[in-house]
Each structure stands twice: as C-alpha cells, then as structure tokens.
C-alpha cells in the first residue's frame, strides 16, 4: 500500500505537470524514464527517489519543496473529505484554465463562483 507522502508527492507532480501543460511523455523524456513510470509516480504506486524528484523539479522549473507543500494540510483534509479533487481530470483541466485567465477577470469569476456556491448551499 502506498505511503501517504508518496501519494501526496505524486499528486503534486501531476498538478504541476498539468499547470504547465506538460504530458507524461514529455516529463518522462526530460527525466530519462518511460511515461509509465511517471504514471506510477503520480499515483504513488512507486516512490520517487530524491535524485529523480530533483530532475522533475528542474524539468518543470520549480523548487523541490513544491512537491512537499501542503502535505500536513492534505493529511488533515483527507481525514475530512472522501474524494480528492486533484485526481479528477476535469477538475485539473478547470484549474489549469482558471489560472490562464487574466487576474482581474479571474477575480470576477471567483466571486461569481463563490456567490453561486453560497446560493446553492442554502
């Protein structure tokens, strides 16, 4: 059974890859593995070595600690939430699209979503 830390790191790898529009194949080529190995890293099935994580961080132009960020919060949230939105392809596409919108428009969209979710929760 995968360790929660390996699952968290895998999710963060997938999230960053999606944010920058990189495929598993492209990441695999940059770090010298097959895309199937990237799939295993992203699901937490295989543990990512420190050197491989370093290579991935460089390939995706982020500091290594990005992959550990939010781990404590994620563990707490996992205790409260059944599903994980970062495993949903549609949610990741929405997130990527959201951050491609100019900031001022993005704020408006966020406020609209907040109002709609507040209305639907009543």
Image: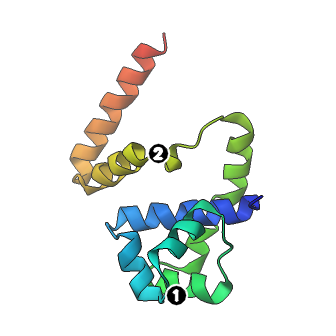
On the image, the x and y values in percent for residue 120 come to 42, 15
- Helix, strand, or loop for circle 2? loop
Q: Earlier in the sequence, mark 2 or mark 1?
A: 1
Q: Which residue is mark 2?
A: 88
Q: Which residue is at a point 41% across and 48% down the rendered structure image?
A: 89
How is the structure coloured here?
rainbow
Mark 1 element type: helix
* Disc nearest the viewer among 2 and 1: 2
Query: Looking at the image, which is closer to me, 25 or 83?
Result: 25
Q: Is residue 100 depicted above or below 116 in this figure?
A: below
Q: Is residue 69 visible?
A: no
Check the picture and name the quadrant holding the N terminus: bottom right
Q: Image check: 96 left or right of 31? A: left
Identify the residue under disc 1: 55
Give the alpha-carbon distance from disc 2 to disc 1, as whole Å.
26 Å
Q: Is residue 52 above or below residue 109?
A: below
Q: Quadrant of residue 23?
A: bottom left
User: Where's residue 78, x and y in %?
Assistant: 70, 43
- Mark 1 neighbour density, 10 Å: few (under 14) some (14–19) many (20 or more): some
Residue extending farthest top: 122
- Residue 72: image location, x then y, percent: 72, 56
């Amino acid at each position: 059974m995968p360790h929660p830390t390996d699952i968290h790191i895998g999710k963060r790898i997938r999230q960053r890859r999606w944010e920058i529009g990189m495929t598993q194949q492209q990441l695999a080529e940059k770090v010298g593995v097959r895309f199937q190995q990237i799939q295993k890293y992203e699901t937490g099935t295989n543990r990512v070595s420190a050197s491989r994580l370093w290579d991935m961080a460089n390939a995706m132009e982020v500091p290594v600690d990005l992959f550990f960020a939010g781990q404590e919060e994620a563990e707490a949230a996992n205790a409260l939430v059944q599903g994980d939105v970062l495993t949903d392809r549609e949610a990741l596409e929405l997130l990527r699209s959201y951050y491609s919108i100019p900031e001022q428009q993005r704020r408006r969209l966020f406020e609209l979503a907040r109002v709609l979710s507040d209305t639907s929760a009543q």
